[in-house]
C-alpha cells in the first residue's frame, strides 16, 4: 500500500529555504524549487530521464512530464524534467535550471534536448547583451559610409567590448583614430570616450607591472 501523497507545500521547509536562499533568483521562476510531488525514476522503458541528470544535482519531487510530440527529434527523448542545481560558469553563483524552464526550452522554443544551461539568468542576459554589442560593432565596422554619429557609436561599442574582456587593448590604435576622425563635430563626446580609453590603458599598464613583479 502506497503512502498518502504529500501536498506540494509540505516539501517547502525551513531547511529548504535556507539551502536555496543564496541561489540566483529567476525573474519568472523565482529562487526556490517548484515541488510537484512527482519523483519518477529511470526504467528505460516508459521513463527516460536526461543522461546528464546526476542524483546529487537533481531536486527530488520536482518532476514535470514532457510532451514528446513537441520535443525536437532525439535518439533518447526525455519523458520528465527535474529542477536541477547548477553553478554558473561565469559568476560561480548557484542557480536552479527549473523543470518548467526546460519544458519551455525544449518544447516551446524548439531547443535540441542536449542543449544545456550553464549560466544563471543574469549572466545569460549579459551574454546576449554582449552579443548584440558585438553585432552592432561588426555592422558599423563593415559600413564604409559611416556617419560621424555612427562612428561614435562604433567606438562606444568597441570600448564596451574591451571593458568586458571580449576585445583587448590591441584595438587602442584604431579607437584613437576613429575618435580623432570625429572630434571636431563631437568634442565633448570624444573627450568622454578618450577618458574611458585612457582608464583602460592605465589598468592594462598596472596589470602588466604586477605580472612583471610576480
Image (tube, rainbow, N blue to C red):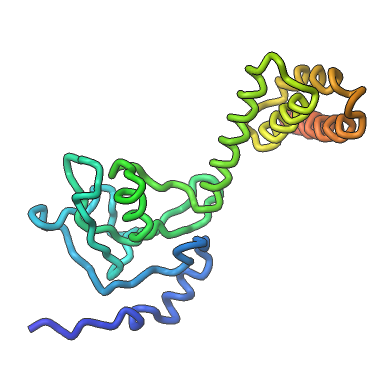
In the displayed orientation, state which residue is furthest to the top. Answer: 144
User: x%, y% of residue 3?
Assistant: 15, 84
In this rendering, the count of numbered labels is 0
Point out the image quarter for the N terminus.
Answer: bottom left
The one nearer the camera, 211 or 101, is 101
Looking at the image, residue 64 lies above or below residue 120: below
> Looking at the rendering, which quadrant does residue 177 occupy?
top right
Q: Is residue 107 left or right of residue 184?
A: left
Locate the C terminus and report the quarter of the image it occupies: top right
Residue situated in front as seen by the camera: 17 or 133: 133
In the picture, measured across the screen, residue 69 lies left or right of residue 15, that is left
Q: Residue at x 73, y 31 (%)?
A: 159
Q: Residue at x 15, y 57 (%)?
A: 42
* Residue 186: image location, x then y, percent: 88, 29
Q: Quadrant of residue 174?
A: top right
Q: Position of residue 7 (x, y in %)?
A: 29, 83
Residue 145 is situated, as x and y percent measured from the top left of the image, at 71, 15
Q: Decide if residue 158 is on the left or right side of residue 78.
A: right
Amino acid at each position: 500500500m502506497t503512502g498518502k501523497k504529500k501536498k506540494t507545500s509540505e516539501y517547502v521547509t525551513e531547511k529548504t529555504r535556507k539551502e536555496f536562499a543564496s541561489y540566483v533568483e529567476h525573474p519568472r521562476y523565482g529562487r526556490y524549487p517548484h515541488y510537484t510531488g512527482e519523483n519518477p525514476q529511470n526504467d528505460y522503458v516508459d521513463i527516460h530521464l536526461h543522461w546528464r541528470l546526476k542524483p546529487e544535482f537533481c531536486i527530488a519531487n520536482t518532476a514535470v512530464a514532457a510532451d514528446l510530440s513537441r520535443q525536437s527529434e532525439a535518439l533518447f527523448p526525455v519523458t520528465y524534467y527535474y529542477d536541477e542545481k547548477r553553478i554558473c560558469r561565469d559568476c560561480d553563483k548557484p542557480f536552479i535550471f527549473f523543470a518548467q524552464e526546460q519544458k519551455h526550452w525544449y518544447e516551446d522554443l524548439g531547443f535540441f534536448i542536449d542543449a544545456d544551461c550553464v549560466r544563471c539568468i543574469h549572466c545569460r542576459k549579459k551574454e546576449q547583451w554582449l552579443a548584440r554589442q558585438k553585432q552592432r560593432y561588426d555592422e558599423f565596422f563593415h559600413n564604409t559610409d559611416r556617419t560621424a554619429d555612427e562612428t561614435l557609436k562604433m567606438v562606444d561599442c568597441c570600448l564596451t567590448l574591451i571593458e568586458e574582456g571580449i576585445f583587448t587593448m590591441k584595438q587602442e590604435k584604431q579607437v584613437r583614430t576613429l575618435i580623432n576622425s570625429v572630434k571636431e563635430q563631437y568634442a565633448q563626446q570624444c573627450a568622454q570616450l578618450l577618458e574611458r580609453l585612457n582608464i583602460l590603458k592605465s589598468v592594462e599598464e598596472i596589470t602588466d607591472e604586477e605580472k612583471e613583479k610576480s
